[in-house]
Amino acid sequence: MTTEKLLIDKNYYQTFMESSENENPIKVLGELFNIEQQKEVADLSYLRFAQGEVYFRNKDYEAAIFKWENVNNELMPWALKNIADAHVALEFLEIAVEYYQTVKTDSVDLKTEVLLQLFSIYKQRGKFEMAANSIKHAVELNPDYPNVTDMARAFFEAQFDFSNAVELAAGEAIRTESLLWFDVLHSYVVQGDTVGMAPASFREVLMTLYSVNQDRFENLLAAIWRSCEQNDSSLEWLKEINHLLLEINPQPLHPWKKLTTLYQGTYDALMDGNRLIEDLSAYIPNHVTNWLKITTGSDAIAAASAVLTWNELYPKWLDETIVGEAERLMSHSRLHGVGMEDVFPVFDSIRKWAKSNELMLGMQEEWLIDELVDSNDFHMMITGTEAVGKSELVNKLLGREISNESTPATVLFKHADQTEIQGITDQEVRAITEQSDLEQIVEAEQPLISYNMPLPFLNNNMLTLIDTPAVNWEASGNALFTYLHLADGLLFVMDASSLQTYHEIELAIKIREQAPDLPIHFLLSDLQENDGHEVELDSLEKTTAWIHTYFPSSKVFVYRPLSNNDGEVEEITKFIQSMVQGYNSEDGIKHKILHFSKHLIQLLLEKRVEMENTLVETIKWNEDMAIKLDGAIHQLTDLQEEKVQDIKKNYRIIKDNVRQELLASIPNLLASCAKLVKEDSDFDNIHATLNDEMNKQIKNYLDDKALPNVTTATREWVTTSEEDFKDSQEYLDEMAESINQLESGEKLHLDCDFKVLDDWRRDIDRMTSGSVELEKINIIKSSASSQFIMKNADKLFGAIIKNKGMLQNKYKQFIQSKDYSNTAATITNTFMQQFEFFEKTLERDIKMFFANPHVVLNKAVEDKQQEIQANEQSLNKMRENPEVYTDPLTLFQLKIRQYEWIDRVPGTFRVSSKNVEYEH
């Protein structure tokens, strides 16, 4: 046993017991202590250290501490550690920690023991962070120390401290290369304890494990991969793992099944259209390179096709060696087609992407797609250049008279238990119940009519017939080509006696160019009325030979529409059945989905351009409308100002006329009161009597004449104002109608507030109803001089004029000659006061009348400005980052191209400045 082991176990004292094993250690050590003490140069530290151990074992901790405190040799660090142990035994933990911390030593084991003791104390006292630091330090210092890593793992797991637990497991796995630790790390990953950790932190452990055990390597790598997929570090992990595999260069001799599946799944996720190609450039090259390296057998086809697909588009991304390997795999592998489970998700992703980007397909496109996906029938298209019995053939097959050569629409016939007829255009899918409905549908561009009804022949042969209008060979045949890729086979009806056969062959060749994989067969129609007048044999053979020159695998059938031969129907049936023979509905639907996927992508690219153009046009339109609306606001303001001036002017004229009438009439009325002075008047009180009478005359005048005149005039003014308001409303209605004719959205209503007129009528009634209430005015006694004269007139003139008549005349002259202008002004001002106040409110009221049109027009301008701003932002975003739109479509194209590689469909990508195009 080593000395350090003895010191750790406190068995150092046994070194003094070699010849006294059966004696009491205390006695033996005491005797040795006395002997040593008697020496001239005594060294008692070793014996004291040993005695301390014995006392400690006998739980005499104080004696032990006393002995260890007096150790002064190289054992002093161990003595200090033991003193701390004694204090732990005495439960003096604070003192123990202080002693542990004073231990200074070069001994790794002693340092480890101190750290473990501190770890135990900190854990006991609930200081878990300090405990973690202690145990981590111990592992770092001396990982091979007995149980230290197990203690650390148990502690970290108990504390749910998986950051340190993972670090411990990874470190120990790398250090020891023990599968046990790799398995521990794997369990942490599976439990989700590594979520959020940097992918780079797994690099070294994976490198180590690859050299130890490749099965475990794949298991751990797969677990980490799935964990990283659940958080934001998936792309960071992808970059890290691909760099790692490029460095490791794993050999395909190992069956990397899990890794292959992960590469396939991650590749599909990268291709979902949610990332830009510029971003993918950091991942795709290494990803497909590693994917191809690890795959074997049939699994390699997907990887190889991915390599070749990306190489067609970005040849500088991939190493020539890996491209060559992909080409070798594709050329030497057996034919591996893709299934519906592969192609349909891509097609569905394109549709979902279109909807998420607010790119709605037309109703006809949607209907065709649903028909494509939902039907397992063989879609047989029947077409021809002239009315050569095509409709008669269709009607014979259907067993009823439905098809008509003159119908300008493409008609689809399908068996169903219940009859349902639909008209499908780009704008709507309409149920057809009346002839008028059918007539409206066929007027649309490239209409499609769907007949679902009991049709036994179609049901028995699992057929859907597509009957196209007769195609002029000089025309492009748009309707035919629109629905061409819905067909699984084409029956081209030709006039056997026509001199234009070569034109029909040219059209058939053009059809084949549009749909190279579409089987095309020919039906030669003989329109002669009887069997004895048949087409010449050499002409028939010449036409058939001509057909087979360009279409060597096509079938040719001669048909007489006007024949009553029942056997001919059976022959036609067999001919059509031969066309359907060997048809695989899944393959047919799959290829059509691939075609429609490419068609849909092209349509979406066109819609992208259309969207940009629409935004430009919308912005220009809204700017023009904003200018028009702003002009309308100016017109409204001018109209309002005009009405304010006119209505106020009309009212002011009435008010001024009333004022002038009062100022002119009141003085005359007061002067006329002279007639009230009689010879027998009481001249002592004549001034009071006259004053009362004058006030009375004024009130009567105001009540009986002035007020009725004002009432009449103001009511007429309200009527005139109402006409002005109606004219204004009519003008604004015309303005709104003019604007609404230009706008397709919510209609403007510039309704004015006619309640203003009711308020005016109410105010006028209030001002003119009843009688005028005036305070009594001192008219005669309105000045000191007049009061003096009136009161003392008899005294002043009494001595001179004794005649009552003369006095009467003097009074009359005084009253008639008096200046009543101030009195008239006072009375007029009082009378006119409420009319003056009413005038001040007119401008406010008239503006209230026009308030709503102002609000509506200003809101319309504000809405236009907001629309312009929003559309400009959308347009700028679209122009600044066109890849946000085009890149997802390019990725969809790449996915489709990959499936075409797998299905051995030749083709290349052509890169344009705006988007990636595909051509056969």
Image (spheres, rainbow, N blue to C red):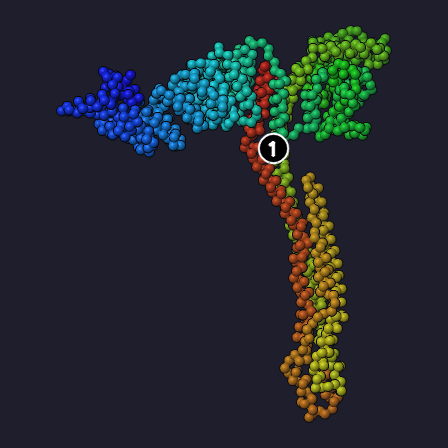
The vertical placement of 678 against 159, above or below, is: below
Residues 582 and 167: in front is 167
Q: Amino acid at mark 1?
A: Glu
- Indicate the quadrant where residue 113 lies: top left
Quadrant showing the C terminus: top right
Point 71% across, 91% down: residue: 801
The residue that disc 1 covers is 612
Coordinates of residue 788 in the picture (x, y in percent) = 65, 84
x, y (%) of residue 242?
A: 47, 20
Neighbourhood count class around disc 1 (C-alpha, 10 Å): few under 14, some 14–19, many 20 upward:
some
Image-based side of 343 in relation to 156, left or right: right
**Quadrant location of residue 312?**
top right
Secondary structure at numbered mark 1: helix
Image quarter where the N terminus lies is top left
The spot of residue 485 in percent (x, y) is 68, 19
Whole-percent x and y of residue 752? Answer: 70, 51
Residue at 63% over, 29% down: 355
Is there any visible trace of residue 719 in the rendered image?
yes
Residue closer to the observer: 145 or 370: 145
Q: Residue at x 74, y 69 (%)?
A: 771
**Is residue 171 at least partly visible in the picture?**
no
Query: Residue extending furthest left?
Result: 40
Image label count: 1
Question: Looking at this view, is 458 or 312 the one in front?
Answer: 458
